[in-house]
């Protein structure tokens, strides 16, 4: 599988990673090699096979709608790198 | 009593019979850690003060008659640093979380503490549990105590090395594609990956949610069984945790394995497997036969698709699970950024190491528009086929014997440059995770460099008893032979 | 100019009125100090896992059943991955592949005709946090209180052709949701948010034109304006020979226009995959029956009952049940005073008049049933007359006062003192000597005038029937005397 520079750009944008020149070259190499190898599963005939999303055969795992005390705000915010007015902060976010 | 060699059960017996106090045990262990840590570097953080304080509390409670039914009361334990501990830093060996201090305990921690265990510290791992050597840790590599020029394996390398190197009596690891079994094998200790759903994942920092499972590492099979009893069982906080499971008692695992049918999949012993490993495992076959087990050849043809399916699923889930690390709520935040997009990109590009980024890129690719069916969905189907193949195998046998790894531990610095080769090293362990099965790695000899070799026993879903029982019988027989 | 038709489909997000969030036990209460309705789970702390709220599931199913949907027997959750600061895990747990309800419909009535609007699907998901844009700095603040509040997204088919139909659809939907008690549907608080997908095509064509998605309308009126404006905008573009661009636009109600939202560099590639942390839901016949049985009386049934049980005309029953708060006020007041027709009159006439005057929506009504019942009773018992009662009503409608106390304090009771009354009448007759002659000449109308004057003199606090009787008596007496 040939990985184009556009694909590298696209995938790194999805992963929200910035790659320098060397990293881009390395990523191209890695993706080509690893995706090339992964291709081997295509040879398995899976036409009549269901995808197995959950290995533990549980269903309807639910809880009752009962309020529990939330935890202290201090605990919520204590690991945040930058807070203001008891809120997490980011540079001005435009609406998406 | 040599704390660096003793088993957890022996130790707790000594504590209960008042031969030793918990404080003496903890201090002795901390002392050994101090001496050995510069050499092996098993830990990311050591919670010395908390451990000493806890030791005193637990000792008092034992004297008051508490923990009467607890097999491991007073025993110190090391915890892999991707399991959340309230008030103790939990880093995942990543720069991203190097200062992260959880506000809650993982369910397994709550249970261990309720059973009177003492948390010693947090052990090294590959960054976010991605890797098989601990070399991808932001905090530096752990050395294999059997030969410090070699890696301890990974990702639970710190836990396995600590148990092997006298820096912990028992430890917890996590296993997504072999991360408990492979380092246990490389370090010469016993490591159990329970059935998916046997142990709560609440508080285990996710790598690949559908495959991750916490499990014990110890010097003996019985120690692993004792830890499993404490940590296993339903948890309302983890919806994927199974209900009505029973973890085997020590009495149950001491039973004879007379007549047990042990499957021997020829595919697992073909090319790729080193000669030394093959020879040692064939000796295991002999021992099990002596114990009364019947060895039967079985077919596991699909296992070769395990590694590709594993890397698709694990990387995809990781790309989602690790998206939350963006420098906003917790963890590392880049110091230079112009806008929101840069904050994200800079933080993640600096905060994550090479191997993590590699997997995030692969994961983003396989999930990206147009590829879902060809990769992720296909891998889920392969997972189903694999599980079905194991299910059929277990109609004929009670458990399956395989190698854990193709070779013994590699030298430090030899693995990282070739990711694909590294990924292929997981061939013997990943099918177990994909099928959600329990498996144990048990030491069975050493190679010419004094590096341990292990074998793997794979059980049916929730068939922990059978693999523990068989491993225990093996262990006893071999020990008898040595005496 | 060619003739065009507008094709509209709606995506309506509704916050469910559960007590707790969808995946954790934090309260869903609106407002609160920033980040105080939060826990490790809803802010996506590493290692946490979601546990599904049963009530949220049942609410979603109830909406599905009330809109003739097929309930997906086995449904699952999926992760929708994207980076944005209001989404702490960087993925939203939602449903793509197997939404909980599908293929339903809602019947709407407009002036022109009745029509069925198809429901494509309803899916269950979690709400995001709130961003507070600090105008003084270049910083955005994040409050996660709303994060994890359960949402359903109701996706209609593109079956609507005008703003009128859209409003009829939304009104009908709102009634269903309110009657089911699954949401308070307050647009101003964001518990009901409608996005409009709109496209234009030539009449007669059966191909859908390129559509735009319009967001950020916070009232029905804004929706009407947004539809009209977008319709004009698209037709203009088409007439100019330029194609409509598929994009998301943000409505600015103050400027009465919309703006294209800056599309992210990466096109929306959400990399959906099945949520590994949540096992599937499977609806048994029993569970669905239970949900159905618990379904409260819906609008149509209620309208029927008001006619048969209370003997209200169809028109009145329709108005009263046209909003849940009004229907509730009606029923509660009726239970207290047992005068359904009186209650209905008060609501249909005075209440609606006051609401119209003050531009109040039914959910902003603060009128309490106890007070209205007391007022009705005072009239029934002859404590106050009708004229006075309207004055009292205005007060209890607007302020929090007790009608009985108000009447007492302001001495509004009907005066029953006959001597006092007679004196007043006599005085009025005296002041109008011409009236006696007129009465003698058979001009009965003069009685009414005198009654009016007496009432005025009594400041309205007399019983007009008694006054009438008394006026006739006094006139009669005067005539006799004068003979």
Image (cartoon, rainbow, N blue to C red):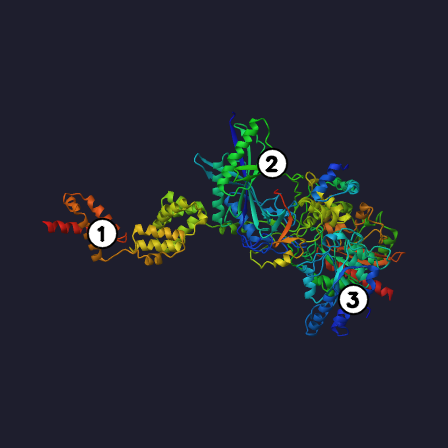
Give the CA distance from mark 2 to mark 1: 73 Å
**Residue B449 seen:** yes
**Figure quadrant of residue C420:** bottom left
Identify which residue, B35 or A54, lies in the foreground: B35
Q: In the visual, does C184 lie left or right of C372?
A: right
Residue bearing the label numbered 1: C467
Q: Residues within 10 Å of mark 2 (few under 14, many from 20)?
A: some
Residue bearing the label numbered 2: C247
Front tag of 3 and 2? 2
Tag of residue A13: none
Are the residues flagged by discs 2 and 1 in contact, CB closer than 8 Å?
Answer: no
Mark 2 and mark 1 lie on one chain; the one further toward the N terminus is 2
Residues marked 3 and 2, same chain: no
Q: In the visual, does C479 lie left or right of B173?
A: left
**Figure quadrant of residue C437:** top left
* Residue at far top of view: C1
Identify which residue, B130 or C371, lies in the foreground: C371
Give the CA distance from mark 3 to mark 1: 103 Å
Report x, y in % for residue A87. Answer: 61, 53
**Figure quadrant of residue B73:** bottom right
Q: Chain of mark 3?
A: B
Q: Residues within 10 Å of mark 3 (few under 14, many from 20)?
A: many
Identify which residue, C6 or C84, lies in the foreground: C84
**Residue C76 seen:** no
Q: Chain of mark 1?
A: C
Give the CA distance from mark 3 to mark 2: 62 Å
Report x, y in % for residue C153. Answer: 56, 44
Relative to C50, is B51 above or below?
below
Residue bearing the label numbered 3: B30
Report x, y in % for residue C318. Answer: 40, 44
Name the element at disc 3: helix
Front tag of 3 and 1? 1
């Amino acid at each position: 599988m040939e990985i184009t520079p556009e694909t590298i750009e696209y995938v790194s944008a999805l992963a929200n990673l910035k790659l320098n020149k060397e990293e881009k070259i390395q990523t191209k190499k890695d993706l080509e090699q690893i995706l090339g190898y992964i291709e081997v599963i295509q040879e398995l005939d899976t036409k009549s096979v269901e995808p197995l999303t959950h290995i533990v055969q549980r269903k309807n795992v639910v809880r009752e709608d009962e309020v529990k005390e939330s935890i202290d705000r201090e605990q919520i915010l204590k690991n945040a790198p930058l807070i203001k007015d008891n809120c997490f902060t980011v540079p001005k976010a435009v609406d998406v | 009593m040599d704390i660096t060699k003793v088993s957890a059960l022996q130790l707790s017996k000594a504590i209960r019979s008042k031969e030793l106090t918990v404080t003496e045990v903890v201090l002795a262990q901390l002392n050994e850690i101090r001496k050995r840590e510069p050499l092996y570097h098993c830990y990311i953080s050591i919670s010395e003060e908390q451990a000493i304080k806890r030791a005193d509390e637990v000792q008092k409670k034992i004297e008051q008659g508490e923990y009467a039914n607890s097999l491991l009361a007073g025993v110190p334990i090391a915890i892999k640093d991707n399991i959340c501990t309230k008030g103790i830093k939990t880093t995942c060996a990543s720069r991203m979380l190097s200062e992260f201090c959880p506000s809650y305990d993982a369910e397994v921690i709550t249970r261990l503490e309720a059973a009177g265990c003492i948390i010693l510290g947090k052990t090294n791992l590959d960054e976010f549990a991605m890797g098989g050597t601990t070399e991808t840790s932001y905090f530096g590599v752990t050395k294999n105590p059997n030969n410090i020029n070699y890696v301890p394996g990974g990702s639970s390398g710190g836990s396995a090395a600590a148990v092997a190197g006298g820096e912990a009596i028992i430890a917890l690891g996590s296993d997504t594609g072999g991360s408990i079994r492979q380092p246990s094998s490389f370090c010469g200790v016993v490591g159990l990956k329970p059935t998916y759903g046997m142990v709560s994942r609440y508080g285990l920092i996710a790598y690949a949610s559908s495959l991750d499972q916490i499990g014990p590492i110890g010097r003996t099979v019985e120690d692993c069984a004792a830890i499993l009893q404490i940590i296993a069982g339903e948890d309302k906080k983890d919806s994927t945790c199974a209900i009505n499971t029973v973890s085997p008692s020590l009495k149950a695992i001491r039973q004879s394995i007379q007549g047990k049918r042990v499957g021997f999949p020829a595919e697992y012993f073909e090319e790729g497997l080193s000669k030394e490993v093959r020879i040692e495992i064939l000796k295991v076959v002999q021992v099990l036969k002596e114990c009364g087990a019947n060895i039967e050849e079985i077919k596991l043809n699909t296992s070769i698709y395990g590694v590709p399916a594993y890397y698709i699923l694990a990387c995809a889930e990781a790309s989602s699970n690790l998206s939350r690390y963006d420098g906003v709520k917790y963890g590392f935040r880049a110091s230079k950024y112009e806008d929101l997009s840069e904050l994200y990109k800079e933080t993640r590009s600096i905060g994550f190491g090479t191997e993590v980024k590699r997997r995030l890129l692969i994961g983003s690719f396989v999930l990206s528009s147009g590829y879902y069916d060809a990769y992720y969905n296909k891998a889920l189907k392969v997972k189903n086929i694999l599980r079905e193949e194991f299910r059929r195998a277990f109609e004929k046998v009670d458990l399956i014997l395989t190698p854990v790894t193709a070779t013994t531990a590699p030298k430090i610095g030899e693995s990282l440059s070739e990711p694909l080769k590294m990924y292929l090293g997981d061939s013997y362990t990943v099918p177990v995770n994909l099928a959600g099965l329990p498996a144990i790695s048990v030491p069975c000899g050493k190679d010419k460099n004094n590096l341990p070799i292990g074998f793997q026993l794979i059980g049916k879903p929730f068939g922990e008893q059978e693999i523990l029982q068989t491993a225990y019988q093996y262990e006893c027989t071999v020990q008898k032979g040595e005496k | 100019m060619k003739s065009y038709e507008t094709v509209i489909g709606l995506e309506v997000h509704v916050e469910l009125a559960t007590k707790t969030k969808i995946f954790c036990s934090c309260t869903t209460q609106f407002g609160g100090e920033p980040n105080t309705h939060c826990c490790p789970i809803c802010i996506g702390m590493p290692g946490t896992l979601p546990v599904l709220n049963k009530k949220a599931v049942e609410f979603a199913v109830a909406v599905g059943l009330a809109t003739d949907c097929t309930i997906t027997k086995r449904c699952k959750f999926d992760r929708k991955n994207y980076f944005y600061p209001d989404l702490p895990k960087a993925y939203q747990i939602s449903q793509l592949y197997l939404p909980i309800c599908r293929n339903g419909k809602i019947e709407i009535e407009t002036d022109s005709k009745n029509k069925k609007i198809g429901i494509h699907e309803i899916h269950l998901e979690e709400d995001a946090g709130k961003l507070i844009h600090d105008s003084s700095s270049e910083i955005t603040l994040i409050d996660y209180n709303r994060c994890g509040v359960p949402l359903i997204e109701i996706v209609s088919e593109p079956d609507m052709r005008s703003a009128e139909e859209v409003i009829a659809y939304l009104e009908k939907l709102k009634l269903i949701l309110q009657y089911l008690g699954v949401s308070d549907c307050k647009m101003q608080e964001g518990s009901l948010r409608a996005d409009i997908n709109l496209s234009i095509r030539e009449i007669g064509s059966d191909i859908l034109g390129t559509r735009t998605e319009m967001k950020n309308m916070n009232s029905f009126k804004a929706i009407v304006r947004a539809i009209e404006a977008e319709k004009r905008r698209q037709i203009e573009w088409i007439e100019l020979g330029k194609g409509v661009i598929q994009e998301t636009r943000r409505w600015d109600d103050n400027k009465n226009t919309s703006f294209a939202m800056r599309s992210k560099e990466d096109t929306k590639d959400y990399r959906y995959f099945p949520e590994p942390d949540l096992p599937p839901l499977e609806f048994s016949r029993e569970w669905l029956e239970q949900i159905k049985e618990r379904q409260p009386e819906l609008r149509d049934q209620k309208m029927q009952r008001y006619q048969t049980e209370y003997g209200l005309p169809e028109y009145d029953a329709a108005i009263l049940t046209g909003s849940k708060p009004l229907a509730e006020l009606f029923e509660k007041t009726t239970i207290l005073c047992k005068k359904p027709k009186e209650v209905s009159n008060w609501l249909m006439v005075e209440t609606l008049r006051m609401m119209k005057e003050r531009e109040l929506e039914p959910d902003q009504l603060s009128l309490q049933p106890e007070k209205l019942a007391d007022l009705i009773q005072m009239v029934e018992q002859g404590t106050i007359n009708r004229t006075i009662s309207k004055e009292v009503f205005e007060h209890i409608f607007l302020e929090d006062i007790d009608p009985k106390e108000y009447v007492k304090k302001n001495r509004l009771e009907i005066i029953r003192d006959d001597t006092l009354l007679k004196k007043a009448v006599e005085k009025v007759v005296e002041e109008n000597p011409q009236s006696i002659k007129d009465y003698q000449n058979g001009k009965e109308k003069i009685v009414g005038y005198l009654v009016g004057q007496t009432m005025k003199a009594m400041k309205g606090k007399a019983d007009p029937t008694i006054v009438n009787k008394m006026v006739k008596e006094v006139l009669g007496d005067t005539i006799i005397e004068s003979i």
